Amino acid sequence: LITDEEAAKQFADDVNIKAEEVNFRYVSAAWTYNTNITQENQEAMVAESLRLAEFDQEVAHNASAFFWTNFTDTNLRRIFSRLVDIGTAAMPDTEKLERLNHIQSEMRTIYSTGEVCLSESECLPLDPDLTRLFAESRDYDRLLAAWQGWRDVSGKKMKDLYEEFVALSNEAILANGYEDTGAYWRSWYDTPTFEEDLVDLFETLKPLYVNLHAYTRKKLRELYGADKFPSTGQIPAHLLGNMWAQTWNNLYDVLEPYQNKDSIDVTPEMIRQNFTAIKMFEVSDEFFESLGMIKMPDSFWNYSMLSKPDDRDVVCHASAWDFYNRQDFRVKQCTEITMEDLITVHHEMGHIEYFLQYKDQPVVYRGGANPGFHEAVGDVISLSVQTPEHLEKIGLIQNVTNDNEADINFLMRMALQKIAFLPFGYLIDQWRWSVFSGETPKDKYNEKWWDLRCKYQGVSPPVTRTEEDFDPAAKFHIPNNTPYIRYFVSFVIQFQFHRALCNASEQSGPLHHCDIYRNQLAGTKLSDMLKLGSSLPWPEAMMMVSGEDKMNGTALMEYFQPLTEWLQEQNGNDIGWEDACPKPDTKD
Ligand SMILES: O=C(CCC(O)(O)[C@H](Cc1ccccc1)NC(=O)c1ccccc1)N[C@@H](Cc1c[nH]c2ccccc12)C(=O)O
Ligand SMILES: [Zn+2]
């Protein structure tokens, strides 16, 4: 084995240049497919992903000719550990790798082209139609038809494909040195106690969720009639304003604690001011600029897809794209003129800002310190943007009242977006890890899913489910094979970052009123961490920004403290659903 570290550095530099070209080719083919779904573009993307895999395999093979585990240079060791870790590209059998990539693109296409016919003449795609229906409709039966219809045209069609996908993914990952795909995904957090830490975090935050669930259930029983609700305490999954019951912000009008206060839902005002998708992205870009951070390059504005085209099929689920040439960065989003989409705009722009900050790192370091960091950047900014104070600064709200009742209203709105999400963000990969590990076989896929949905989220299926159904795949990230625990991590650490940046900007007052807009101290602190990419272990990156090196829920609990007390008063003892859910061990 080669021990010469100078030769190793030269090897890594050569690989880095080639990696930019090969990644650019693949990303370009993926962009073409995602923004124009055709058989031809799907096949071209699969072909390019195979070329990328071959490149990764060759690099891993050549890198293992070096005795890199013994290198004295820590950074060089870290780089080589990334060069040899190539995920499913390690699949030795090219035919099987082609089949794996083909199955993934098949599932992606089924999901992105699915439509639900609610009547002869009314066939609706998920974006924007079914999404809007779930945001606006209060018609129990219409919501049920859309809920069941979507699962029939998406998840139900993918059960066999998914089973085959799991086997092939695990076979490939085994060749990469991990026992299953879930173990590989968890390795990105590089924390031996990662799963325990998540359990502790969830237990800490669970009381906040249980209180929000109880309050919401009471209000929905008043709206739809208690007879529509199981006596065991769950909420039917189609009544929460979202296709997956993952965020409940669209129920704000039903749940508003103090009526006739100035509405903080700026959707009507955005429409009144003739907001466009581009305007929404300009608002976000201006915020990053105000922090002294990097603004969007011209290529972003020239090549992004910021609205749904009307002449072709596209993957509408929002995403941010790094073309690995240090100059081309894009967002693809079917943007609607709503507050919810303004928040997603900031989320996607957070990804782009991270790309811009770490663009001069080696390719192996162009990623988040851990995947949760990448998901948190935009959300940290949007915690400031969503404050009534900030919305007033940018002219989306007039004459903000700042009294205790307005405070509770605002915190309720934020809780429907952040606290409601926590169990969902947690359970998706609990399900997926159990499938990858073999604990959940195909004939238990749907049962396991609803056990977790009951246990963590306290929601129940509004109609009977069987193993003919495959409800997990009705959620983008399952057919798209995008890990999900990153969002749970993000929803926790974004409050730690927010608290740290607010302290850095010497903002006094409660956390939920803090707006770091135009504060260069905060901007510099955040930028310095983003520039690192994944070149340092994430606890060191977190320490740089927040002075903490662990995920913890204290910042999130501090932020919501006033609402937690208010909810406890409102709910009394009418809370919970736990004993309704099947216990896993008694299942067998
Ligand atoms: O999926 C997303 C946003 C899309 C994304 O920006 O996370 C996107 C997902 C994706 C990954 C891989 C391929 C295609 C889409 N991730 C990225 O674009 C991305 C880009 C670079 C690095 C990491 C992620 N949000 C999640 C979680 C979520 C729900 N509501 C929210 C509100 C604010 C922030 C997040 C959410 C969801 O919709 O369930
Ligand atoms: Zn994201």
Image (cartoon, rainbow, N blue to C red):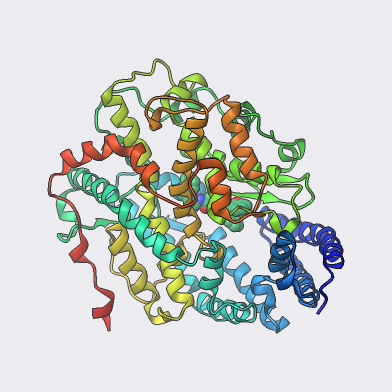
Q: Quadrant of residue 109?
A: bottom right
Say above or below: 382 vs 58: above
The number of numbered discs placed on residues in the rendered structure image is: 0
Q: Which of 272 and 414 is in front in this view?
A: 414
Q: Where does the C terminus fall, quadrant-wise?
A: bottom left
Say which residue appears at 74% left-offset and 43% top-offset: 303
The outermost residue toward the top is: 399
Q: Where does the N terminus fall, quadrant-wise?
A: bottom right
**Residue 123 visible:** no
| Residue 437, image x, y percentages | 47, 78
Say which residue appears at 42% left-offset and 17% top-offset: 398
Q: In the visual, does 434 lie left or right of 329?
A: left
| Residue 497, image x, y percentages | 49, 41
Q: Quadrant of residue 287?
A: top right
Say above or below: 401 vs 289: above
| Residue 368, image x, y percentages | 61, 52
**Residue 499 visible:** yes
Q: In the visual, does 358 lie left or right of 136?
A: right
Q: In which quarter of the image is residue 274?
A: top right
Say which residue appears at 66% left-offset and 82% top-offset: 96
| Residue 123, image x, y percentages | 47, 54
Q: Which of 424 and 108 is in front in this view?
A: 424
Q: In the visual, does 555 lie left or right of 35?
A: left
The outermost residue toward the front is: 72
Q: Which of 570 and 221 is in front in this view?
A: 570
Say above or below: 579 vs 384: below
The outermost residue toward the left is: 573
Q: In the visual, does 47 lie left or right of 139?
A: right
